[in-house]
Each structure stands twice: as structure tokens, then as C-alpha cells.
Image: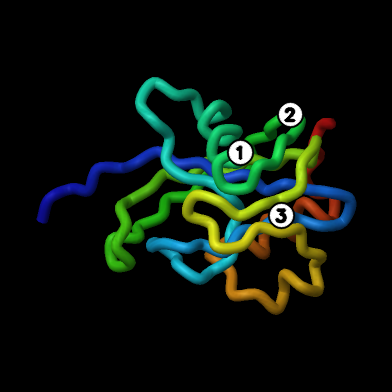
């Protein structure tokens, strides 16, 4: 068995007051599930630049300072994807209304009660709870 190439990827958990922006994924991997907007890092692109680009492409949203929250290894080969090393950033909403574009079917801000009823990708709820309970501090 050959070793899988690890693809760098990013996502951004955007906080606005007591709500978090999620997108419903329109393509594999994780099609139909709600997640933070994000995607692959392009060649010669920094993680932060990729995070801002993906956020703008998928939602049209602008954010303040990006704070790296965690890295997650995701093996989505069984779901039509690759093996990704996902860097999850957190940031405060700085402007714009979410509009689904690119590979997002829906983009919106949700409160915790709504998020708990959505079909989510792994680790999404855990990160949402950390942002809402103040475990993580985000800059403006």
C-alpha cells in the first residue's frame, strides 16, 4: 500500500456575537454536512492567506485577526477526498453578509441551539463550544 500524500487545508470558524458561521458542503468530502468554510492551500500560499481566500470565495465574509485553533488530520479517501492536514482558524466577523458560493450550498450564522440540530463534520461542535464559552480568545 502506498503512503498517501498529505494535502494542506484550512478552515475558519467565524464568530459574530453569540453565533458561528457554517457552510453546508456542496461537494465531497462531507457533502451535505455543515462545517466551517475552507479548502485547500494553493502552492506558495500561506495558511493565513489561504484561509482568507477560501472564506471570501465560499461566503464573501471578511474577518479580523486569524487565530490558529488546532490542526486535524483528516483521511477522506473513502469519501472521494484525500488525506488533509487541516489548520482550523478562529476569527471575529469584520464585515459582509454570508452568501454561499464556490462549493458551499448554504452559508449562514447559526446560534448554538441551531448548530446542535445540524449534521456536522467531526470536531465542528467541539470547536463551536470552545469559541462560545470563551475557552479561546479571538482578537478584533
Q: Is residue 50 above or below residue 61?
A: above
Quadrant location, the N terminus: bottom left
Residue visible at 49% across and 24% down in the picture: 46
Q: Is residue 133 above or below residue 24?
A: above
Whether 11 is drawn above or below 23: the answer is above
Describe the element under mark 3 as helix, strand or loop: strand
Q: Which mark is residue 21?
A: 3
Cα–Cα gap, marks 2 and 3:
16 Å
Disc 3 packing (10 Å; few <14; some 14–19; many ≥20)? many
Task: Check disc 2 and report its element: helix, strand or loop.
Answer: loop
Residue 70 screen position, x and y as percent: 58, 44
**Residue 133 location, quadrant:** bottom right
Q: Are marks 3 and 1 in contact (CB under 8 Å)?
A: no
In this picture, residue 106 sits left or right of residue 134: left
* Lower sequence index among marks 2 and 3: 3
State the residue position of label 1. 56
Of the two numbered discs 1 and 2 on the same chain, state the one appearing first in sequence.
1
Residue 83 at x, y = what percent?
33, 51
Amino acid at each position: 500500500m502506498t503512503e498517501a500524500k498529505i494535502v494542506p487545508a484550512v478552515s475558519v470558524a467565524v464568530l459574530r456575537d453569540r453565533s458561528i458561521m457554517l457552510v453546508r458542503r456542496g461537494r465531497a468530502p462531507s457533502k451535505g454536512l455543515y462545517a466551517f468554510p475552507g479548502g485547500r492551500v494553493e502552492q506558495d500560499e500561506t495558511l493565513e492567506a489561504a484561509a482568507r481566500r477560501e472564506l471570501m470565495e465560499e461566503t464573501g465574509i471578511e474577518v479580523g485577526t486569524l487565530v490558529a485553533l488546532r490542526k486535524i488530520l483528516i483521511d477522506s479517501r473513502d469519501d472521494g477526498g484525500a488525506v488533509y492536514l487541516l489548520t482550523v482558524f478562529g476569527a471575529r466577523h469584520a464585515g459582509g453578509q454570508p452568501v454561499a458560493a464556490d462549493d458551499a450550498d448554504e452559508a449562514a450564522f447559526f446560534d448554538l441551539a441551531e448548530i446542535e440540530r445540524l449534521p456536522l463534520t467531526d470536531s465542528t461542535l467541539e470547536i463551536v463550544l470552545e469559541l462560545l464559552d470563551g475557552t479561546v480568545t479571538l482578537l478584533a
